[in-house]
Amino acid sequence: MSQRLKDLLRRIIDRARVSPSPVTRWGIDFARTSFRGLAWLLPGLHLGWMSNLRHVGWDGDDLILRGWSFVRGTEHGGSPRHDVYLRAARRPVWLGGRLARAEVHHVPNPDVMSSLRAELRYDGSTWEARFPAAQLAGLPAGRWGLHARVVGGHRRSWGPVRNSYPFGTPATAMARRVGDRLIRPLIVADGGGTFVESKPLGIPAASVDATGRDVTIVLSGDLSRRLGRPVLRGPSKAEVAFQTRPEGDQILLTATVPTGKTVVDARTGIRRPPRWTAMAESGEPITLLTDSAGHRPNAASRLLVGPSPSRAVEIVDVPHFVEVDAAERDGDVIRLTGSVAGEVDEFDLVLAAARAEIPVTFESIDAAGRFVATAPLAVRRWGGPALPPMRGGYVLEGRLRGRSGNAARFATFVSEAYLSTVPSIDAQADMRLRFEVNGQPQLLVRVARPRATDEYGAFNQVQLFNAYALGDAAVADAGPLDAVCFESFFGRSATCNPRAIDAEIARQRPDLPRYWSVDDLSVAVPDGAIPLVIGTRDWWRVRESARWIVTNEWLRGRYVKKPFQTVLQTWHGSMYKRIGMDRGGGGQTDRARAERANWDMFISQNGDTTPIIQQAYEFEGASASAVLEIGYPRNDELTRIAPERVEAIRQLIGVPEGDRVVMYAPTWREAGQQVELLDLISLAKAVGPGYTFLQRAHVRTLEEGESIGSKAVIDVSTHPQINDLFLASDLLITDYSSMMFDYSVTGRPMLFYTPDIEEYTDPKVRGAYFDLEELAPGPVVRTVPEVVELLGSIDDWVPSFAARYDAWRRRFNHLDDGNASARAVDALFGFDPSARDNGVRRRRRFEPAAGEEA
């Protein structure tokens, strides 16, 4: 089954599970019960079978594998019995296929409970399997599939270990010589299974040396017949022939490694240095059976020569060599130790995530190149306070000084000794760190939400949901809590309309506690407010007991509203693209209707938007007045622009003095929609000097790309306050984003780059409420050359749009007068929950949104 079809089915099921229709929910429950019953009766079909390989390692010549196995939705008891074995991949047991059984025992691993919708405890499902060297040495050549069996809870289940963790040792497992064979744990991705491969040693190399870009491989014995015409095979199947020279009972192979460019993996986006593999003419690899026989970069040569995962001789063309031997948390820093070759004054190290970086500083380096470096665990972003880093995966990489973009970046490495130590976890009150490696292998530090042991994982989240959302624990702890709980963009920021309302409440009611749902502690909350990390016990308690909830997005299926609670939906923009039930589709309509049941009031920015909200979210009849047509609180500060503040913001984000600032902020697209967004680096070159471009990614796409930047482009995607960016920019380029209705409060020009406007506005795709080309207060264009031309003639075309701009502001900004926050707070505290007409919704089970971390 293709991944796209799997994703489609998953979305359909997700929507059905949260449907307000009892018939739909009953149908899903019936299907799940039937599925589990069939799995119980016919375990050989492997229905609901979950088995995952998490760790691969060697203890001497014994192979150590760790993973888990269970049947989803089935209780195997706290201490099931596990059997892990290798089976010949091409011949089943009943046709004479051989088995190799491991020595198995239980090893606790909390990650087994981190999968979504865990309704049962699966912590007894983890195992460690040891395959002794003597057993591995006797494996005939070929692939051997890894299988597992679990017995417990009055049932027996079995199946292949289909999946593996993409980071850590399963992605970097090294082959090892065991007897007269090479044994390599071989991972096949996308559910294709996990295998152990047994194969001949190949052509063994006695030693390898490198001088400059010349590599010499020494072979012992009479191997000329097997060698043929040996070559180095590199990127894009390029080949370099070895020169072969006999010398006594040895054969010397010499070749010059060409200078190559960094290779970018098309699937993962990981940048890798060029790699060359030595092999005979027949394709048989020249193998390096011991690590000590290779060459590490030094003054003689910067080439790294060592074994590939299959132990073939591999030459890696590294611009600078940095290898990590150990990484751990040490108080408020991550401490790294390792070795380095070359001058450290030529480059910097960073722990880099998609949209964030942590600088790494060398603390000491000795004459042999051994170093100690540290990375701070409190980072200042955009002039804010020092806070923990954003949640995400941070890869250790190097940056060459004096270069920019991908040309500046180079990969680092980890030692084979370090591979045996990962993954390791450091969980503390401010963050949870997981030390891993990627397929390079490079050091990967994963920063996760800080949660206590009994808050981590989906099973524990279900227990908290049952206690606080469905039970009475929240009210029993403190009763209805006289406090306001804010949430903005699913906790990824503390901004937008909720932040403006927070400021007004702090002014009017300084005694009232204000809490913010935050994705992690990197989110800076307003002064005097209290951050609550999503999924912690305090978060569940406050959100299910606070009298007032203020949000600008859907609260998702896990929120269960209490009778005494008031929910103010501020939303996050006026409507050009269709929303809610206007988008059509049964699943979308059901989700929108279910969310609508949470809301008591909905803020409308203007009279044009009010009927859209009433229609799209069914605020009809008596509830029509629940749509508050009061203007947008977040725009209050845009009505009062102080030149000194504008200058301070520009200096903070790094805009050169005198430059014209252009911000590009496209909206997000639905899954499957493709569009060529503006390449700002190319655009800056085409426009020429005097311009600084700000790149602003949508909050829903932050994890999909990575930061970009050059002398003329600044990535401001993680800047917490969009209003600061509005104030700093002289012109906005957008497409269909609701920013168009807020930026116009400033009166500054806008340009609309819409290469896919026909597709986007098609009702079958998304649909729109009005014709943008007819009403837009600026040019609507489809091509990059048009954008370049318009940027070069801003002073010419802006006056011609003055009348349309004025009409736009009268239509959409007539209530943005600087007092919307006060009107919103009056409405919030003036609402009587006992008078609501939409009832209170109670859910029967924990339902995280699709793709949401539990």
Image: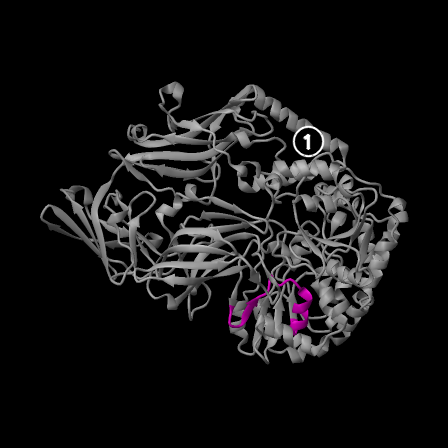
The answer to whether 699 appears left or right of 545 in the picture is: left
Q: Is residue 445 or residue 611 the one in the foreground?
A: 445
Element carrying mark 1: helix
Residue at 66% from the left image edge and 47% from the top image edge: 534
Q: Where does residue 246 sit, x and y in percent of width and height?
A: 12, 50
Q: Quadrant of residue 460?
A: top right
Q: Where does residue 429 sit, x and y in percent of width and height?
A: 59, 49
Location of mark 1 (residue): 28
Q: Where does residue 818 sit, x and y in percent of width and height?
A: 80, 68
User: Which quadrant does the C terminus fall into?
Assistant: top right
In the image, is residue 721 part of the stretch drawn in magenta?
Answer: yes
Q: Is residue 2 or residue 132 the one in the foreground?
A: 132
**Numbered range of the magenta stretch:** 710-731
The amino acid marked with disc number 1 is Ile
Q: Indicate the colouring scheme.
A: one colour
The answer to whether 345 appears left or right of 732 in the picture is: left
Q: Where does residue 762 sit, x and y in percent of width and height?
A: 69, 53
Q: Residue furthest left?
A: 248
The answer to whether 322 appears left or right of 525 in the picture is: left
The local crowd at label 1, few if under 14, some if 14 to 19, many if 20 or more residues have their Cα within 10 Å, is: some
- Image: 765 above or below 84: below
Residue at 74% from the left image edge and 36% from the top image edge: 470
Residue 632 visible here: no
In the image, is residue 408 part of the stretch drawn in magenta?
Answer: no
